[in-house]
Image (cartoon, coloured by chain):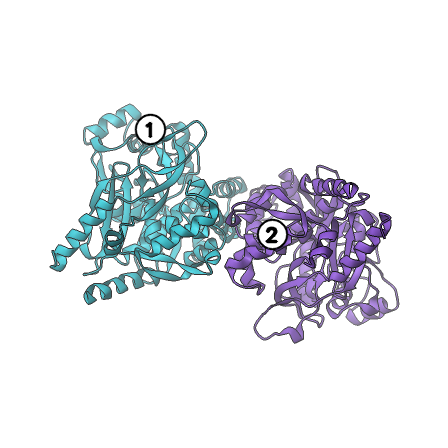
Chain colours: A purple, B cyan
Amino acid sequence: MEAIEKANALAVERILTSDPVLIDVMPARDVVPGLKDGMILHAGPPIEWDRMCGPMKGAITGIAVYEGWASDLADAEAKAAAGDFEFHPNHHFDCVGPMTGMTTVSQPMLVVENRTFGNRAYCAINEGLGKVMRFGGNDAEVLDRLRWLRDDFGPALGGAIRHNGGLELKNIIARGLTMGDEMHQRNVACSGLTLRALAPAMAETATDNAVLAKALAFIAGNDQFFLNIAMAMGKSMTDAARGIDGSSIVTSMSRNGTDFGVRVSGTGDQWFVAPVEMPEGLYFPGYSEADANPDMGDSAIVETIGLGGFAMGASPAVAGFVGAGSASDAGNFTRAMGEITAAESPEWTIPAMDYLGVPTGIDIRLVVDTGLAPTINTGIAHRKPGIGQVGAGVVKAPMECFTQALAAFADRMGVS
Amino acid sequence: MEAIEKANALAVERILTSDPVLIDVMPARDVVPGLKDGMILHAGPPIEWDRMCGPMKGAITGIAVYEGWASDLADAEAKAAAGDFEFHPNHHFDCVGPMTGMTTVSQPMLVVENRTFGNRAYCAINEGLGKVMRFGGNDAEVLDRLRWLRDDFGPALGGAIRHNGGLELKNIIARGLTMGDEMHQRNVACSGLTLRALAPAMAETATDNAVLAKALAFIAGNDQFFLNIAMAMGKSMTDAARGIDGSSIVTSMSRNGTDFGVRVSGTGDQWFVAPVEMPEGLYFPGYSEADANPDMGDSAIVETIGLGGFAMGASPAVAGFVGAGSASDAGNFTRAMGEITAAESPEWTIPAMDYLGVPTGIDIRLVVDTGLAPTINTGIAHRKPGIGQVGAGVVKAPMECFTQALAAFADRMGVS
């Protein structure tokens, strides 16, 4: 139908003409609209306490202790079960978060502004590898790191970003794609490009070189540092395409470890939900699929803008890391995702594929027609709280989300 | 012959088991053995003043003024022509230098130690893009930058490297190859990896944050910063393979803008020389082949260790930059160089070629037998002094160097 094509062209144009800029790091309390004490935002579509997976419960008890809303983890668990905290999806508050995706008032948030449309999106700072809250970690080491991010690192990074007049992200992504990143499971290039862009300003604004050295080492030591910036960027870009009447383009894909949720431009803020799948991938030594939690996190926002599994062809090294076959076949994933998307990005291109633009704008009609579910590159969490990452892999968005979405979309368009 | 195979196996083993570590930055006077006042080391095989090309003469007059050996450029030129300076190849003093390759007593030198064999090699610090001495630049801006490198940047970088206990280079190259660098015309990844490895130590050892911020910005602003480190590394690795009786493996390829010189392990320090060729490539806007100086610099040392043109398959983005055809064909260059090399590196591999090791150890017998000359990725200088870089391209090592070398090698082996 012509009206759908027109609406989709507008949705894709809004994604592609977005100009995302990292403008600040600020406490969530001061920048996230509507966020209040006692609220805990999580990854994925809405979910209540008793249906949450192990790592999500682990993260929630940890963040409640960090915020001072519980005396210890047991107290936090009792209060959570008693309904003392309000749970909401990050996506309902202009936020995103990787894996468990905890967002609460005291955390320092990366602020990305979409300069074309004026909207903003937020994501907490990536904690690094090992025992971290996004994988359900909640012990003293995890909470101490969050306090350091809040008290030292966040203010230092925010000061440097402001001093720099912001950091334009579109060029960083374009460069990163020529350097083997797909910005979901591989962010080493973009993390380095971010460090080199901000290090001089960090030095100029530093008041204590011990803090400065530790902050530089923190970024330098975390190849996934950029992931959370890419996620806030993705949210700021897809939010610009929300609510376009008649558009069948996906505006978010997101998982809470129990359910996978999809939202579509033309059906507003309705979630289309199905059980999450188990990633297929490679496990770190000592772990296997028996340890794995099902798919989790808001990070699939990067796939909705053509990165991650959609840009696999840019990142032959990630194909091995996520167990997706031989490096030379990485381009096949990108070509397949071209079958379910409305456009190729003119600015984000893949040199090894002779500068093919990344496939952008997932059309639920094409997903259902072709039977090709979106491919997502993902980290794999241990199913028990507090252990952390056990592997990385590839997961499919459940087809049921798209068939539900298409039925609702058809209803709304009067073609049921 | 079995003796040759055995000697070549040893030569290649020495290259491949080398462990190059950037250990310091020090004034050339204090570290380069035999270097004295009045000596000017240059790129390529030996050459006298009257046969030097324009950019080489431009750099020599500039460096003489910088060292205080001449009052101005005209005075320097008169003194050079009168024989007041001693000219020697960098390669005769354990040094290398890109393009004109000026090395003199006051310059701060990157010091790379090959920890496996204990030898050291040296290279000056990359000056950045634009008007620079390596392309023949010699005005006040160029000399002021050299003074800043000597007085501020070199000591800051050296202090950080020492504080860090050195910087192991082999891992950086391995990572850079997964990030689109070939370490000759593309060093953006390795420059970033170096910055992130040293920035924390630079902060810890800084005494003045204005200097620190400028130093960080200098590295961050120069995508080719790592080239000179890669060159000193290459020299330290190939020097370990010098002088192996019976080996037909190339230990250096180097150009002075007039002549191309090759040295071979089994023929000691003899140069096999032929006229340099003109690179074929792409020119910056406003320039053409009519402006180009023929091939120049010691930087082809990186091709002798399997990088640069030999690792083109790792760097589809560089194929476009140097005008070497479509990005997807970049692997063909690497495969062709596999025809003239004795081994594939087990540690430096190319993900997009399913982790093929870079072709290492050029065998002059294979070059002559196949008629395949080594492919070198190179910058192109303006033929007039003081203008700078006008393009980038691909150039072939002249076949005549290899036929000469093979004749001398055969002589020495008693099979003329």
Residue under label 2, please give it: A211
Occupied quadrant, residue A4: top right
**Compared with residue A313, is residue A357 higher up or lower down, i.e. above or below?**
above
Q: The residue marked by circle 2 belongs to what chain?
A: A
Secondary element under disc 1, as helix, strand or loop, is: loop
B300 relative to A259 in the view: left or right: left
Return the residue nearer the eye: B123 or A183: A183
Asked if one can make out residue A28 in the rendered structure from this viewpoint, the answer is yes
Q: The residue marked by circle 1 belongs to what chain?
A: B
Q: Amino acid at mark 1?
A: Pro
Secondary element under disc 2, as helix, strand or loop, is: helix
Q: What residue sits 43% from the left and 47% below the top?
A: B226
Q: CA distance from mark 2 to mark 1?
A: 46 Å
Could you tell me residue A57's position as x and y percent? 77, 68
A74 relative to B409 in the view: left or right: right
B285 relative to B302 in the view: left or right: right
Could you tell me residue A379's position as x and y percent? 64, 63
Could you tell me residue A260's position as x and y percent? 75, 61
Mark 2 vs mark 1: in front: 1
